[in-house]
Image (spheres, rainbow, N blue to C red):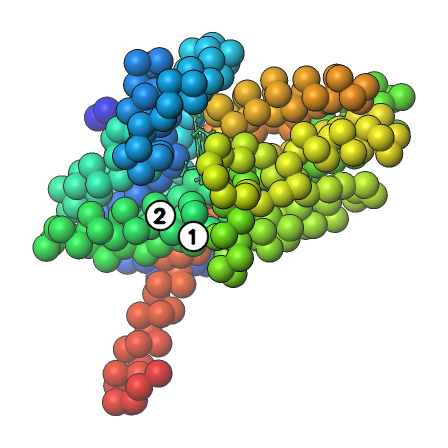
Amino acid sequence: MDGRTTDNAPRPPGSPPSSAAAEGTVRGEGLLGLLVMAYGTPQSLDEVEPYYTHIRHGRPPTPELLQELIDRYKAIGGRSPLHEITEEQARRVAATVAERLGRPVSAFVGYLHAKPFIAEAVERLVGARPREAVALVMAPQYSAASVALYQQAAREALARHAGAPPVHFIDHFHGHPGFVAALARRVEATLAALPPDRRDGAVVVFTAHSIPQPVVDRGDPYPRHVEETAAKVAAAAGLQRWRVAYQSAGRTADPWLGPDVTDVIRELAREGARAVVACPVGFVADHLEVLYDLDIEARQVAEEAGVGFARTPSLNADPDFIEVLADLVLDRLGATRHEAAAAGARAEDGGEP
Ligand code: FEC
């Protein structure tokens, strides 16, 4: 077994399923496949150029842009921990689903912009011959500029395999109660750890990756999803003062969705805020955009503006987040059973939906 695949023994026969969603699936003994997809990162500084070229749809970056990106990786220690964390998340969610479902589960990790690419993960998944599979993108909010691209890569790869199993896609989990509660706990703990004189005047800024404004203008649900996550977390944590901001806007000619987190920090400082607590609701792991764009760049802006700065810990492979991911997979299987039952009933009626 390598780091990208996890095989798990089923739990002892006879133990009851712990999720109602799982009940319809425990009878069969077939393997469940999990396709876990994430952004991807270069594994060394030498890989930054091909990685950046891939992100830019095959257009190599200028030497200045490339150097700027290399410097950002150097500032976080030379590389991003994204792959290790994603693989740990995949291993643990596979183990948890296997335990709760009483079926063997194998997880396959594929990245949008780095090796192993999504197509490779799909090939390995198909080769394992699961009875069915669930596909999960490690991004909570849906966008044509993010989740849709992962799903398209997976669907194109699946279409190349005649014997591919049915794959059930999870589109988003921006409002999942367990996800909201996990973030709210981290906001409360981060606020509680601030010095008392900063805590009283602290404002929580919920952040997500920016996307190009033209995508938003075509009616993308992403900003609404981000606002909804933020509002639910703020309510769960009982916050009085909070804002939504976007971060890490790309270096392209298009305008990007704002307001940018650095502008919001400066604005809050002018309004008399004592501290900013950044809560990256659009990310589920530590990586460049968290460790550099928030921990280094946004912190520096806050220091220059005279406000305190803290960041909520990432969800990573923490047990509370793994439970959320397992719920999502089991719920998707449950929904799939209902869809299949409804289609069967319609077929028996001989009617169209
Ligand atoms: O740790 C790492 O090394 C990878 C961190 C990383 C994550 C991430 C997530 C998202 N991105 C999204 C959209 C875009 C669009 C462009 C774009 C460009 C970059 C560049 C780097 C980068 N992204 Fe990223 N993104 C990460 C890293 N991203 C590096 C290139 C340099 C730069 O612009 O900063 C622009 C593409 C273009 O030029 O045409 C658009 C979105 C997410 C959040 C959802 C997800 O995870 O998929 C949306 C992590």
Q: Which mark is residue 149?
A: 2
Which x, y percent locates residue 294?
A: 61, 25
Q: Is residue 127 left or right of residue 265?
A: left
Q: Which image quadrant: the C terminus?
A: bottom left
Q: Is residue 26 left or right of residue 142?
A: left
Q: Secondary structure at mark 2?
A: helix
Q: Secondary structure at mark 1?
A: loop
Q: Is residue 109 visible?
A: no
Residue 51 occupies quadrant:
top left
Q: Looking at the image, which is closer to me, 118 or 320? A: 118
Residue 333 occupies quadrant:
bottom left
Q: Is mark 2 within 8 Å of ligand 1?
A: yes
Kind of residue at badge 2:
Leu
Looking at the image, which residue is at 49% across and 60% down? 218
Residue furthest to the left in view is 162
Which x, y percent locates residue 79?
A: 41, 15
Q: Quadrant of ligand 1?
A: top left
Residue 351 occupies quadrant:
bottom left
Looking at the image, which residue is at 17% across and 41% down? 123
Q: Is residue 234 left or right of residue 315?
A: right
Kind of residue at badge 1:
Ala
Looking at the image, which residue is at 35% across and 39% down? 37
Which x, y percent locates residue 195?
A: 83, 19
Q: Which image quadrant: the N terminus?
A: top left
Label 2–label 1 contact, CB within 8 A: yes
Looking at the image, which residue is at 36% across and 26% down? 61
Q: Which mark is residue 144?
A: 1
Q: Looking at the image, which is closer to me, 278 or 4? A: 278
Q: Estimate the spatial distance between the alpha carbons at disc 2 and disc 1, rounded to whole Å.
A: 7 Å
